[in-house]
Amino acid sequence: MPIFLVGFMGCGKSTVARGLAKFSGWEFVDLDARVCELAGAESVAEIFEKSGEEEFRRLERQAVDMLSPTSRTIVATGGGAPCYGDNMERFMALGTTVYLKMSPLALRDRLLRVRVVRPKIVGMSPEELLDYVTTLLAEREKFYSRARVIIDCDDVPSGSVVARLRYLTR
Ligand code: S3P
C-alpha cells in the first residue's frame, strides 16, 4: 500500500519520505513537484505569484486525481493538501496515511531555519509566524488527525521518524 505523509509545513514530510524511500527501495513522490509539473512552473512560489493560491489548489487537486501510486510509493503531500476538497479521503482510500505531528513552536522554529521559499509565510517576523502557525494548525488539525498513524515528531530527528515508520514498508 502506498504511504501518504501529511502534516503542517516544515514538519519534515519530504525529508522523512525521502529517507523512508531510500531505506525501503520504494519510490518517492513529491506532490508539490507534481503540481509544479502540471503548471509548468519552477516552484510553488512561482505558481502562487503568477496565478494565486486558488489556482494552486485547483492544480493540487488535479495532481491528487492523477495519483495512482503503486503499492511501493511514499508520497510527501503539501501542508494544505489534506485540508481541501476530499483530498484526505482520497489519500485514505488509496493507502496508509501518516501524520507527522509537531507543536506550533517546534514548527515555527523549523520554518525559521529552512530556506525554502514558502509563499504563505514569506516575510513574517518570528512572532507573526508563531501566531500564524498556531491559528492555521488549529484549523487543519482535524484533517491531519484523521490519518491512520500519528507520530509525535517534536524533538525527534528525521532519522528516528524514518526508523519508526519502517515497519510500514515491510
Ligand atoms: C502549503 C504547503 C506547501 C505547499 C504550498 C502550500 C500549505 O507544502 O504545498 O506552499 O498550504 O501549507 P509543504 O508543506 O511541503 O511546505
Image (cartoon, rainbow, N blue to C red):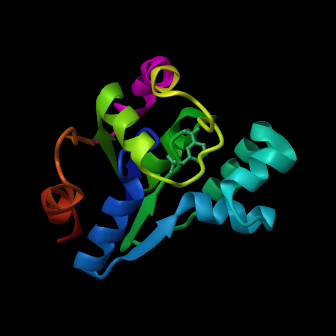
Residue at image position (19%, 58%) is 165
Residue nearer the viewer, 56 or 103:
103
- Residue 48 visible? The answer is yes
Residue at image position (77%, 64%) is 41
Q: In which quarter of the image is residue 80?
A: top right
- Outermost residue toward the bottom in this view: 25
* Position of 56 relative to 166 (above/below): above
Q: Which quarter shows the C terminus?
A: bottom left
- Outermost residue toward the front in this view: 125
* Position of 92 relative to 135 (above/below): below
> Does the magenta stretch mainly form a helix, a strand or a loop?
helix
Residue at image position (30%, 43%) is 100
Q: Give the range drawn in magenta.
A: 130-148
Does the magenta portion include 94?
no
Image coordinates of residue 151 in percent, x first then y, are 21, 42
Residue at image position (21%, 38%) is 154
